[in-house]
Amino acid sequence: GQQLNQSPQSMFIQEGEDVSMNCTSSSIFNTWLWYKQEPGEGPVLLIALYKAGELTSNGRLTAQFGITRKDSFLNISASIPSDVGIYFCAGQSGTYKYIFGTGTRLKVLA
Amino acid sequence: GAVVSQHPSRVICKSGTSVKIECRSLDFQATTMFWYRQFPKQSLMLMATSNEGSKATYEQGVEKDKFLINHASLTLSTLTVTSAHPEDSSFYICSASIGLLAGPETQYFGPGTRLLVL
């Protein structure tokens, strides 16, 4: 099935550092979503984006809907150990279905 | 936020047997439920969409006779993996929504069920 490409695939960062990850697609999406998944659990929605160019924050998280509608990025500022997990982007275009990205695995070193 | 539960959380079965996984919305009526499969270190792949009282819609490449979905009530959907084989071993995740076209803020994922077929 179709997937969105996320980068980086994984990253180790020091506590307190800022993190940036992105998601790209060859197709246009109308909605971009960012989820966090912890081991053995289902994903939890972090941020939803509905308009090209939209920049939305949720606490230390900021995400943007790319102008071309083919990409999105997520920034985490001042990372803390509980930010550990897998971050997935997901896109929606014209149907009710979400297509999930390949995931970025984040590990924070205290 | 709303809570979606899955049971069992883990299951080990012998090859050739069938396994039923339940997905329940605990505090809202879920008109639509989605079933995903996630292989280790991979993304979530949509398997099927079920609406209460209707037959499920399966994604291309997903065998409907192997993965039986029943959405008999507004709070319960079940996925039965029939004649399971080792390649069916995966993490199965459901999500529940108040409606097919409801926004992502009203779609909630369950904690997943890890299936291991020996």
Image (cartoon, grey):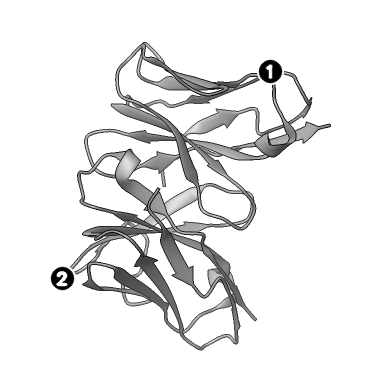
The answer to whether residue B58 of the structure is visible from this angle is: no
Q: Residue at x 72, y 30 (%)?
A: A80
Query: Circle 1 sits in a helix, a strand or a loop, which is it?
Result: loop
Measuring from the top left, give residue A48's x and y in whole percent: 38, 30
* Mark 2, other Cα within 10 Å: few <14 / some 14–19 / many ≥20: few
Depicted A51 relative to depicted B39: above or below: above
The answer to whether residue B40 of the structure is visible from this angle is: yes
Q: Chain of mark 1?
A: A
Dot 1 amino acid type:
Asp
Q: Is residue B18 left or right of residue A67?
A: right
Dot 2 amino acid type:
Gly
Q: Which mark is residue A18?
A: 1
Q: Which mark is residue B53?
A: 2
Q: Nearer the viewer, residue B28 or B107?
A: B28
- C-alpha distance separating marks 1 and 2: 47 Å
Q: Residue at x 23, y 43 (%)?
A: B102
Q: Residue at x 30, y 24 (%)?
A: A50
Q: Which mark is residue A51?
A: none
Depicted A104 relative to depicted B111: above or below: above
Depicted A71 relative to depicted B65: above or below: above
Q: Is residue A90 left or right of residue A16?
A: left
Dot 1 and dot 2 within a common chain = no
